[in-house]
Amino acid sequence: MAPNSNSGRPVAAPSPATKAPTAVLVLSDGSVFKGHGFGATVTNVGEVCFNTSMTGYQEIMTDPSYAGQIITFTFPHIGNVGANPKDHETGAPSALGMITRQLPTDPASWRSDTSLDSWMIANNLPGIAGIDTRALTRRIRDAGAPTGVICHDRDGVFDIEALTAMATSWPGLAGMDLAIEVTGGSKTDWDEGSWDFIEARHRQTEARHRVVAMDFGCKHNILRCLTDAGCDVTVVPADTSAETILAMKPDGVFLSNGPGDPAATADYAAAQIGSIIDADTPVFGICIGHQLMALAMGASTTKMDRGHRGANHPVKDLATGRIEITSQNHGFMVDPDSLPDTLEVTHLSLFDGSIEGLRHLEKPAFCVQYHPESSPGPHDSRYLFDRFTALMDERKG
């Protein structure tokens, strides 16, 4: 056992090739966590959060909703299945860095194409291991998600004063429109279903509905779930006008997940979403799509101190009383005191009582804060994609 300078308690020592620190995590409050670097030898600044998922680190790192964030993984075995291009949720990672308890091991998976360390280097992402991730997680849980700087230097040379200044000067996610940075640049068609491990190919489902997906940072597995549900999906950039979308004559419109402050994205997206809902077009929103639908209807959003990130979050369906274990990743929420009379709460978090789902009382529109597509996470909420297609069926008569 070796002492950890971050917590003062004895913890298992990491097993790097050298005992000298080769990476640091510096928080805006002056806290310094020294550890051992992996991945690219670069320095990044962002909001430090934690994720409780036991699997799916590659999907998490490539989820656009993590743009602007450095992720602490609470599960100790990160990297043991390596990485492969099929598990990307977008073309390139959106997260800014990785914090783990142990250095990644050599991969042990038939699906692995490369090690996590090599994958991080290829994507220019820094990682730090060997710190007390439990102490860091408790700090985030108790005091909120701080700004931090992760720096990997093989020579172990760190200007702590400069790194602290970098952390304190970063403006934070509030007010940032990151959706416009991660959205696709043009209209694209999507027809790839989920992977069939028996047939070793993507499922092909007969399309019954034309759906336009507004891309605020859309995950690939959401598009796969829509395809599996019988949707012919066209993905459009976040700033596409309602006029353009409605001219495509969709049976429904999907509002995707995405990063940043929804109020900032709403500056250009809320009015368009409102026009689509007013046209009686069925609408389904997830994550920031949920928040943008609420903003379009006159509600407001607020920054959460800690956020919800992980694959074990219990949510209650108020209509059925059913408890769903969900995958979540958000740092903003809809303010319950701001809801207009046209919106009804459908789901609540059993962790803190925050709003997890809404439906419009007069229009065929609903949304959830969590991620029914999982990837990673449980599949308890996949029924929501069928609920969306049922709305489109009903509208068609």
Image: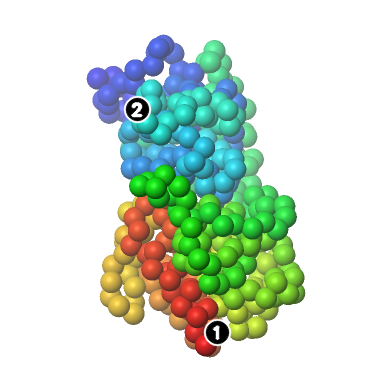
Q: Nearer the viewer, residue 383 or 320?
A: 383
Q: Residues within 10 Å of mark 1 (few under 14, many from 20)?
A: few
Can the viewer see residue 204 in this picture?
A: yes
Judge whether residue 287 can be spotted in this image. Answer: no
In this rendering, position of residue 244 left or right of residue 357: right
- Residue flagged by tag 1: what amino acid is it? Lys
Q: Which amino acid, mark 2?
A: Ala
Q: Residue at x 52, y 78 (%)?
A: 392
* Residue drawn 39% across the image and 47% down it: 199
Report the residue marked by disc 2: 108
Give how far across and how far down residue 30 sits, in percent.
51, 34
Q: Residue at x 56, y 40 (%)?
A: 93
Residue 386 drawn at (x, y percent): 43, 71
- Dot 1: what SS? helix
Q: Secondary structure at mark 2?
A: loop
**Mark sitting earlier along the chain (2/1):** 2
Compared to 15, does 55 lie above or below?
Answer: below
Is residue 150 shown above or below 293?
A: above
- Which of pointers 2 and 1 indicates the residue nearer the eye? 1
To which residue does mark 1 refer?
Answer: 396
Where does the image place residue 24, in percent across and percent down from the top left? 49, 26
Q: Nearer the viewer, residue 94 or 345?
A: 94
Rendered-image quadrant of the N terminus: top left
Colour scheme in use: rainbow
